[in-house]
Amino acid sequence: MKLVKTLIIVVLVFALALLLWVRLGSVPQPVPSAPQTTIAPSATASVTAEPGQEPAPGTEPAESEDPGIDVDAEPEYFTVSMVGDCTLSASPDKRDWGIGFQRTVGDNTDYPFANTVQFLNDDYLTIANLECSLSDKKYSSIEQFSFLGKADYAKILSSGSVEFVTLANNHTLDFGEGAYRDTTDALDAVGVRYAGENECYLYQNEGGLKIGLFCMYNGLTGNAFSLLSASAQEKLVAESKDWIDAAVKKLDEMGAEYTIACLHMGTEGNYETTDVQVELCRYAIDAGFGSVYCTHAHRLQPAELYGDGIIFYGLGNWIFGGHTNPGNGKDPASYDTGIGKITLCRRGSKVTLDSYSFIPCSISSALDPENGVPGANTLNNYQPTPYVEGGKAWERAMSIISGTYEGANYTVGNYWDILRDMGG
């Protein structure tokens, strides 16, 4: 009888220990600080617990030595979404094409985001790169590629739940200062916030988190940068670092609780980052930015956890009116894009990166959402659509984000070759 009682006690102690282990194991873990580590998130899973998930009942938050963290304060969560280039127009000579952006979209400004707005409606902030001018006036441009959409097309952004756009890119001034002012007027009319070259903006919605945004182009794109001498390149990089440092200080003075650098750089058609791109994006994190959102390559590029932040090196095209068939049927990944999401946790006066995710998409709903292999006659219908999870296209987009993609960069020679490929 005594032996039976002893065995019962041992079993109860073991069961209690197992229960405690399981409950403690469910406590959300912090985002790892892993410099130079490439992330490979799933389309829905996050690094830590789902946003807003509390520790298991009966467990207490770990004591923190950071005076900004109030361990007794209720945590607040804010999700920021990021999408790539929004070019809301075809080039001037193709505006009347039946398959062009204007003819496809017409006056239906809800059309471009119809298949993805559900992923953006409930977030705190959505960021995009607006790579065109918006105006109903007639302007001309000397640029080989220039994009002028109707002023009313600003509603595409607002109906798609985009709250902020960066105007710091190489197409902002294609039609001059007058068109730039028309563009900002169009954005103001629909309530979309913005910042231009080397400008800062403090975003806050209904008393929520104050997010500081800094936008910079500074001639850092691969095409322009490669034309400079070595000494001129060094000078430009140093100048860009000075702008980043100044922006961190300014946003701090403005009261930003979390900061995001929106940088425009990289090489068009490349799935790989440039050395300067990596250097400056990481410098931004080292200088104090929480995250970096990078655009320009018109191709999806890797993402990386670095320090305490995350860098999206390139989210590719999103709504891209600049080409009816990117890659000309020869480059399947040219259709790959996606939504980068970060969730921030505010506890007391401390804001940290809580979790992240990536939703792989195609820039066109005309592409097979599972296999995602375009042909020579595939059309871009300017309506981003999620890929089927686990399909070949989904896997390909995820491999680009994780840095394991082995496809070749798209080489077109020069801009005149691009015009020829586009049928211009």
Image (cartoon, helix red, strand yellow):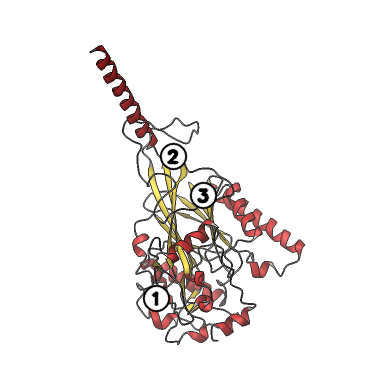
Q: Nearer the viewer, residue 397 or 179?
A: 397
Q: Nearer the viewer, residue 274 or 232?
A: 274
**SS state under label 2:** loop
Dot 3 or dot 2, earlier in sequence: 2
Cβ atoms at labels 1 and 3 below 8 Å apart: no
Q: Depth-wise, is mark 3 or mark 2 nearer the camera? A: 2
Q: Specify whether residue 269 is in view.
A: yes
**SS state under label 1:** loop
Q: Depth-wise, is mark 1 or mark 3 nearer the camera? A: 1
Q: Nearer the viewer, residue 379 or 276?
A: 379
Q: Pick out the residue farthest to the left.
A: 1
Q: Which mark is drawn over residue 60? A: none
**SS state under label 3:** helix
Residue 72: image location, x then y, percent? 38, 32
Q: Which residue is mark 3?
A: 254
Amino acid marked by disc 1: Ala
Q: Quadrant of the N terminus?
A: top left
Q: Which mark is drawn over residue 29? A: 2
Residue 369: image location, x then y, percent? 39, 69
Instruction: Compute the Cα span from label 2 to label 1.
Output: 40 Å
Q: In the image, what residue occupies the spot 69% across and 68% down?
A: 226
